[in-house]
Amino acid sequence: MKRNQGGLVLFVALIFLLIITILGVALLTNSSMDVKMAGAASDRTEALQTANGVLDDVIMNAGTSEAFLKSTGDYNNGLAVNTGLTDEGGNARQAVVHFDVEASCPRSENGTGTDTFVCRHFHDVSEVTFGRRNLGRLEVTNGVSQPLIAPTGS
């Protein structure tokens, strides 16, 4: 004896297929967002390493680039210092050195008299843009104290 099903099995199968399709699209969207977030975090980490590298290059070449040897008036708007590093376009990356103050030096483990040395305090800034259409901006600041022998009569 043969019975007709009346399409109930087909209707239930189509409902299950629709539910599975919706779940698949939701999972694909979620994994796509994860990939984008991982890429953004990677871009930011690379930008941070680049900015730190620029500042390290300024400190490493401080004796040859005269970045910290100018008179204090030359630092009014900051002094741009080219580094040996380049960006994607082949342009030299720059850091900006600002003179803060000439004052007594911070304490060190080598004892000296208070009038023997003075320090010129600087901060140098490196700025890197990153991300899609260079919308991200990362700025790293580094403090530098340069000890000098105090002028007599101070």
Image: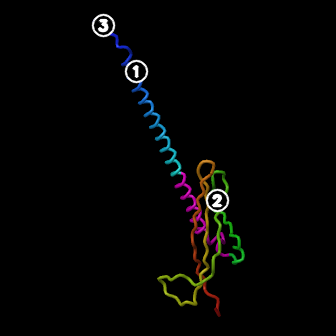
Instruction: Confirm or deny contact between disc 2 and disc 1 (CB under 8 A).
Output: no
Q: Which residues are magenta?
A: 43-69
**Identity, as a three-letter code, of the amino acid under mark 1:** Phe
Q: Earlier in the sequence, mark 2 or mark 3?
A: 3
Q: Residues within 10 Å of mark 2 (few under 14, many from 20)?
A: some
Q: Amino acid at mark 2?
A: Arg
Residue highlighted by disc 1: 11
- Whether residue 136 appears in magenta in the rendering, the answer is no
Q: Which residue is mark 2?
A: 93
The answer to whether the residue labelled 2 contacts the one labelled 3, judged by CB atoms less than 8 Å apart, is: no
Residue 6 locus on image (x, y percent): 37, 14
Assign a secondary structure to mark 1: helix
Check disc 3 and give the amino acid type. Lys
Which residue does the image show at 68% across and 69% down from the upper left?
Answer: 79
Q: Residues under labels 3 and 1: Cα distance?
A: 20 Å
Q: Which residue is mark 3?
A: 2
Residue 46 highlighted magenta (yes or no): yes
Instruction: List x then y, in percent, for residue 88.
Output: 63, 51
